Image (cartoon, grey):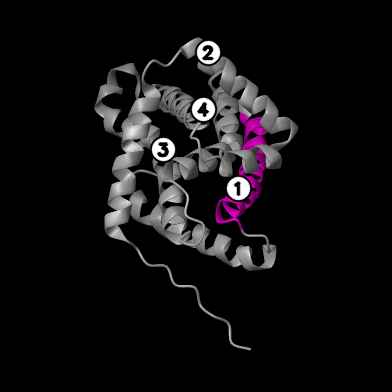
Amino acid sequence: MEEKNEKFSIDTENLKNETVETAKKLKESMKDTDLKKETLATKGFITEMIKNPLEKIKEVANDNSGKFLKTAIFLIIIWTIIVFIGSTYSTISSWGFSRVFNNILSVLKKILAPACGILVYSLIIYIMNDKNKKSLTNIISTVTVTQIPLILASLVSLLTIISYKISLITSPFSQLCETVAIVLGYFGFKNLFAEDESKKFIKKYVLIQLIYYIAYIVIGLLGIYI
């Protein structure tokens, strides 16, 4: 039996329109945001994720109302702040406070990395997923929640500010979180593709990761390590 090779074509016009629409939705989501309310909502969401991660990810992936977009944005902002604190401290400890502004570009590149990584994954999935087309906002929301373990790892890594010896704990924890994120990513992406057969989807997942790491190398040339 011959296996049919899946071909993915890029509809540039459709991608452009979807990107513009996504930008509008992101802008709308940021309007009239109640910080306290959103903090509580995000805390509740993470609690539910810990209790039943696969079911929660499935709910996000199958949602077409965009109700999880604000939570996803809030998570990205939190992740960015965590990276900013960590990279700023690293710069100060390495070069001294007087050199912070001289290395501001390096700090900016580091804080852009989380959002860039999520965007790269989202665009890859949007282009590849032509049979069960999802909005880019839905994909961004799903990808973001699968990265929660990495956000937690970044947060815990800030403990090294107190003492570098704590890295004996934070390093293994970060590795564990990376593994969990890969597993959550598999199931989250699988839900986006509405693929029931694991044997069939594993090939797509490997391809997604392959394209992502090619993007990682290319974007890394700019000093942004997603």
Q: Is there CB contact under 8 Å for labels 1 and 4? A: no
- Looking at the image, residue 35 sits to the left or right of residue 197; the answer is left
- Looking at the image, residue 4 sits to the left or right of residue 107; the answer is right
What separation in Å lies between label 3 and label 2 (alpha carbons)?
23 Å
Residue 156 lies, in percent from the top left, at: 60, 26
What separation in Å lies between label 3 and label 4 (alpha carbons)?
14 Å
Q: Is there CB contact under 8 Å for labels 4 and 2? A: no
Q: Nearer the viewer, mark 1 or mark 3?
A: 1
Does the rendering let one see residue 163? no
Which residue is identified by label 1?
A: 188
Q: Residues within 10 Å of mark 3 (few under 14, many from 20)?
A: some
In the image, what residue occupies the spot 27% across and 32% down?
105
- Looking at the image, residue 102 sits to the left or right of residue 199; the answer is left
Q: Earlier in the sequence, mark 1 or mark 3?
A: 3
Tell me which amino acid carries mark 3: Ala
Tell me which amino acid carries mark 1: Gly
Residue 151 lies, in percent from the top left, at: 55, 32
Q: Is there CB contact under 8 Å for labels 2 and 1? A: no
Element type at mark 2: helix
Which residue is identified by label 3?
A: 115
Which residue is identified by label 4?
A: 71
In the image, what residue occupies the spot 69% across and 28% down?
48
